[in-house]
Amino acid sequence: MRFPLCLLWLYASWASAFDSVPEYRTVIKDRSVQYVLDRSSAEYSSDYLNYQLPAAAEREWLLGKNQYQFSVGSLSSKEFLVEQRLRIQSALAGPLDFQLTWFDESDWDENQQDFFWELGLKSGRHWRWLSFGNIDSNKAENDIGVGGEYHFDSLKKLRFAVLFPDFQRNIRSQDDTEWTSRPVVWSVVGSSASTDTRDFYQYYLRYEPRSVLHNKAQQTYSGLEKYTLGLNGTHDAAWQYRLHIDLKREVQETQVLKTVYYSSRYMTTLDYTWKLENLELRPGVFVLYRRWDKNSQYATVTDYTPSFWVSFPVHSRSDWSTQHQVGWDMVIHQLDNPSVIAEDRSDEALESRLNYRYEIGFNERGSLGFIFSMDLDEFGSPQTWEGGAAQLRLFF
């Protein structure tokens, strides 16, 4: 596979989650490579960075609480970025427990909306064995998996699992599609979180060997293969880091034409929170590198996005609080060989934004936040308003 693996060292040196529920993700529900190619732009990096749930949300998720998290932000006049997840856990009889996880990851790369049930069986002090799956009204799209978890303590664990997406398609399909090579997802997810500080970390690895879907009516074949690596966390309640790498191969084959795509994506952020009297200052940088190979042609995108946020003091009431935050970011966008993507696509761009966030906290019950963005390059014109987002976290 012709992936530029030599770039791994650059981004690993930087090292919440870019995959919000990494244990249940699968490549067969990604956007197509061509879909991403058609939408590549400088503004997307700023949108993606600002609309992610904050690091505190990831730590809260890893602590295992029953909760709902939601973030929705405008990507264009026609599309939203949506990230939401719901988890309900309950102890059953003796060593048995049950967990329901529902999530929606929808942006210009992923498009997966699923719920997974999971039945766990504790064995001894450290082990938990599990079976999990997803039930769809279309039986061809049902998923099933098995795995295990090793719990070092109550807040540190290592999970390994295998997932079989669409495992009934060849006998339950309502159309003329069948797997000639079935999809399989091998995954390892490790995590740890602290109840005393804001520190946590999570890492995930996924390998999805080549799967091939055959459309018998149209006599077409669609092949997918993907490798995914991720790392995110905070250190000393000040440093926040995120790293995500995925390498994908996609093949579209008809009776007369075969198109092969190779797609690689490297994303990393590094932030530092500096407390200055009653203010919190958070400088950071987000780096996004993409490469697409389409048959014998290629294109690359590199976005560097420095940012700076100021958090003002929290104003507390009896059972709720408010906080104001102001931020700035600038996307330095470079596109190599843009004609592969679109004839009129610019190869360089510089986008600056001013962001404002207003958050309402409900003590231990959750929070509600709003983000508003202005385009500093078009400030004072009808294009000043750049968009916004809303974020909600609830515990129950």
Image (cartoon, grey):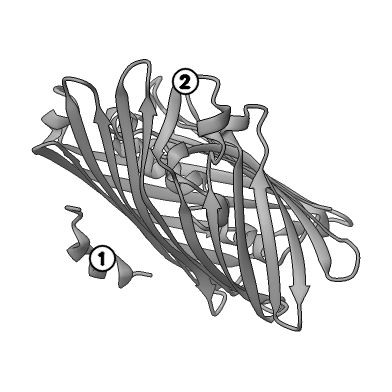
- In percent of width and height, residue 33 lies at 30, 35
Q: Earlier in the sequence, mark 1 or mark 2?
A: 1
Q: How far from the left and from the top, in percent, is residue 322?
A: 73, 51
- Name the residue located 70 percent from the left edge and 71 percent from the top edge: 128
For this rendering, which residue is in front, 133 or 317? 133
Q: In this rendering, is residue 114 above or below 342? A: below
- Give the percent coordinates (x, y) of residue 278: 62, 68
How many numbered markers are drawn? Answer: 2
Q: Residue at x 12, y 29 (%)?
A: 339
| Quarter of the image where one finds residue 62 | bottom right
Residue found 47% across the figure and 50% down from its top: 327
Image disc number at residue 100: none
| Mark carried by residue 78 | 2
* Mark 1 burial class by Cα count in 10 Å: few <14, some 14-19, many 20+: few
340 displayed left or right of 331: left
Q: Amino acid at mark 1?
A: Leu
Secondary structure type for disc 2: loop
Which amino acid type corresponds to the residue marked 2 in the rendered image?
A: Lys
Question: Is residue 287 depicted above or below 128 in this figure?
Answer: above
Disc 1 or disc 2, which is closer to the eye? Answer: 1
**Is any part of residue 55 visible from this angle?**
yes
Q: Position of residue 179 (x, y in %)?
A: 42, 36
Q: Nearer the viewer, residue 292 or 254?
A: 254
Q: Which residue position holds label 1? A: 8
